[in-house]
Every structure is written in structure tokens, then in C-alpha cells.
Image (cartoon, rainbow, N blue to C red):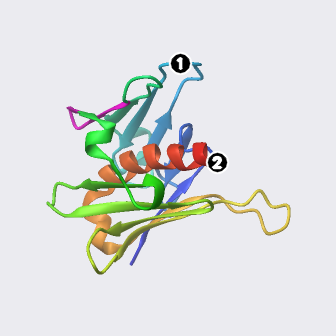
């Protein structure tokens, strides 16, 4: 059964990700700066009881140090990565990004103008995550954006969220 993470805002750089029960799971914050901003991704523990929402613990999961002349850097679980080394450009015109996860497998963010998905980077192209972009409600019903994480990706949700934030920012910048 897929796990759903719903965005509170349209921006992947300034949002809260909620689970199916509307529990806060991740907070993604980027201050509005012209140059050299840093995105912080915070993970929240699940409440131990329905009344325990205020007892949640928070932990910094990742930081993305955005750079426009030099390469951006991703700090994930205490390790510093130059983004071009961790999220290698691939695909048509280099618009997709691939990475090796801690499970030793290669995954690829397939980025198109109005969609994005994470696939296993092998001959099967098995879908691991689908990003469903929200709708403002002008021509179709209003809907918030969400990530649909299939069982084959649920062991690495933290890495999915961290790499998604970078890939989604790149995808939107290209539109």
C-alpha cells in the first residue's frame, strides 16, 4: 500500500509534509534570500498517542546550501555531498537526476514539465515514487500536491524527500 505525503503549500522549498492522518512528518523551510540561501528539512517523530501531537520530537534531516556560481551542497545525515556528485545529471539534455541509495541500488528522478517520478534505474524502470502536482482549482477541482511512495521505496523516505526537494526545484526552474 503506498504511503502518501501531502504538501501544505505549492512550493517544495517552503512547505509542511503531512501523512494521511494529517500528522506533521517533515517541515521544509527556506528563508527568502536573493543569493546563498539554505533549505532546512526537519523530520518529526510520530506521536505516541492521538493526544501526543505536542510531544513530537524534531530532528534536522538535511540542508541544501543553494549556490549559483559554485555547486550546491547537500548535507544529509551528517555527510556533505556536492550535488553534481550525488545527483548526477542523466537522460535527455541532462534533465533527469540519478543517485545511489544506501541500499546500493541506483534510482533516477524522471523530470518532465508537469510530472516527476522516481524509478529504479535499471531495465525495469520500476516506479518507486510519483509526484502528483496540485491544482489551484480554476479548471479542475482544487487539490494539494502529494508524493505517492510505493512499498519498494518506503525504506528510504528520508532520502526520497531530500532528493525530491532539490529535483523539484530544478524542474520548476526549467519550466
Marks 2/1: CA–CA distance: 22 Å
| Residue located 29% across and 62% down the image | 107
At 28% from the left and 72% from the top, the residue drawn is: 152
Mark 2, residue position: 10
Query: Residue shown at 20%/32% (left/top)?
Result: 78
Residue 63 can be seen in this image: yes
Which residue occupies 32% across, 40% down? Answer: 84
> Is 47 above or below relative to 77?
below
| Magenta-tinted stretch | 72-80
- Left-right relation of 153 to 52: left
What secondary structure is the magenta-colored segment mainly?
Answer: strand
Q: Quick check: 113 left or right of 89?
A: right
Can residue 25 be seen by looking at this rendering? no
Queried whether the magenta region covers residue 135, the answer comes back as no
Rendered location of residue 13, percent (x, y): 53, 38
- Magenta span has 75? yes
Q: Seen in the image, is 105 located left or right of residue 16?
A: left
Tell me the residue that label 1 is attached to: 35
Amino acid at each position: 500500500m503506498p504511503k502518501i505525503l501531502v504538501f501544505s503549500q505549492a512550493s517544495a522549498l517552503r512547505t509542511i509534509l503531512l501523512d494521511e492522518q494529517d500528522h506533521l512528518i517533515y517541515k521544509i523551510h527556506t528563508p527568502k534570500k536573493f543569493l546563498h540561501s539554505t533549505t532546512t528539512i526537519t523530520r518529526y517523530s510520530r506521536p505516541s498517542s492521538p493526544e501526543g501531537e505536542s510531544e513530537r520530537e524534531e530532528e534536522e534531516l538535511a540542508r541544501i546550501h543553494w549556490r549559483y556560481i559554485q555547486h550546491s551542497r547537500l548535507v544529509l545525515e551528517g555527510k556533505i555531498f556536492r550535488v553534481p556528485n550525488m545527483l548526477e545529471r542523466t537522460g535527455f539534455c541532462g534533465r533527469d537526476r540519478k543517485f545511489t541509495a544506501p541500499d546500493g541500488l541506483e534510482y533516477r528522478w524522471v523530470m518532465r514539465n508537469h510530472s516527476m517520478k522516481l524509478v529504479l534505474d535499471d531495465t525495469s524502470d520500476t516506479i518507486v515514487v510519483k509526484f502528483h502536482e496540485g491544482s489551484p482549482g480554476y479548471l479542475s477541482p482544487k487539490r494539494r500536491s502529494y508524493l505517492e511512495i510505493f512499498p519498494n521505496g518506503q525504506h528510504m523516505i528520508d532520502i526520497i524527500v531530500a532528493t525530491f526537494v532539490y529535483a523539484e526545484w530544478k524542474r520548476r526552474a526549467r519550466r
